[in-house]
Amino acid sequence: MKIALASDHAGYRHKEEIKAHLVAQGHEVRDLGTHSEESVDYPLLIRPAAQTVARGECDMGIVFGGSGNGEAIVANKVAGIRCAVVWNETSARYAREHNNANMISIGQRLVTLEIAVRAVDVWLGTTFAGGRHARRVREISAVEEAWCDQ
């Protein structure tokens, strides 16, 4: 699987550890930065990662920050992205199973590396449940399409 990664300075360490973990599992990783703990503005890095997923250049994406909230907000501004903030294995499973999230966001200041690794593994290993959830995902897309038409 091709996975896009991006972070700001506050999520850099988790990004690097998760990148190594994903590569060890055989995934192809596209790291869109940042490449140090030097302060950066996260929208400049998160948007390209989300666009990479939206264009189909990567199958999924994971973004990292201090809390993960701002990163998810930026990613969700890109049409076709459903980015969920995850903080444990259960939130990761529901993000994929119920919302068919094609991206997740993790806050390094709030989620330990051990939990982040497990959450990523659960998210990647979970399939979309479909059924009533498919209808809801279509409704999310309809909101996006209606807003883009304005």
Image: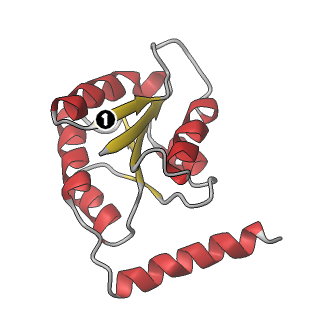
Display colour scheme: secondary structure
- 22 with respect to 4 (left or right): left
Mark 1 belongs to which amino acid?
Glu
Q: Quadrant of residue 29?
A: top left
Q: Residue at x 38, y 66 (%)?
A: 100
Whether residue 70 is situated above or below residue 24 in the rendered picture? below
Percent from the top left, x then y, of residue 85? Answer: 41, 52
Residue 37's quadrant in the figure?
Answer: top left
Tell me residue 114's x, y (percent). Answer: 17, 35
Question: In which quadrant will I find the C terminus?
Answer: bottom right
x and y percentages locating residue 79 in the rendered image: 62, 59
Looking at the rendered structure, the number of numbered marks drawn on it comes to 1
Write the residue at 40% across / 81% down. 134
Residue 108 in sight here:
no
Name the secondary structure under disc 1. strand
Q: Is residue 4 visible?
A: yes
Tell whether 32 sits left or right of 143.
Answer: left
Q: Relative to residue 96, is residue 17 depicted above or below? A: above
**Which residue is outermost to the front?**
57
Q: Residues within 10 Å of mark 1 (few under 14, many from 20)?
A: some
Instruction: Give the answer, above or below, for where 52 lies relative to 113.
Output: below
Q: Is residue 141 left or right of residue 64?
A: right
| Residue pointed to by mark 1 | 28
What residue lies at 47% left-to-right and 76% top-to-bottom? 137
Instruction: State left or right for residue 119 relative to residue 78.
Output: left
In this picture, is 70 found above or below 21? below
Q: Residue 61 appears at what percent x and percent y?
A: 41, 45
Which residue occupies 23% across, 30% down? 23
User: Where is residue 19, by image quadrant?
Assistant: top left
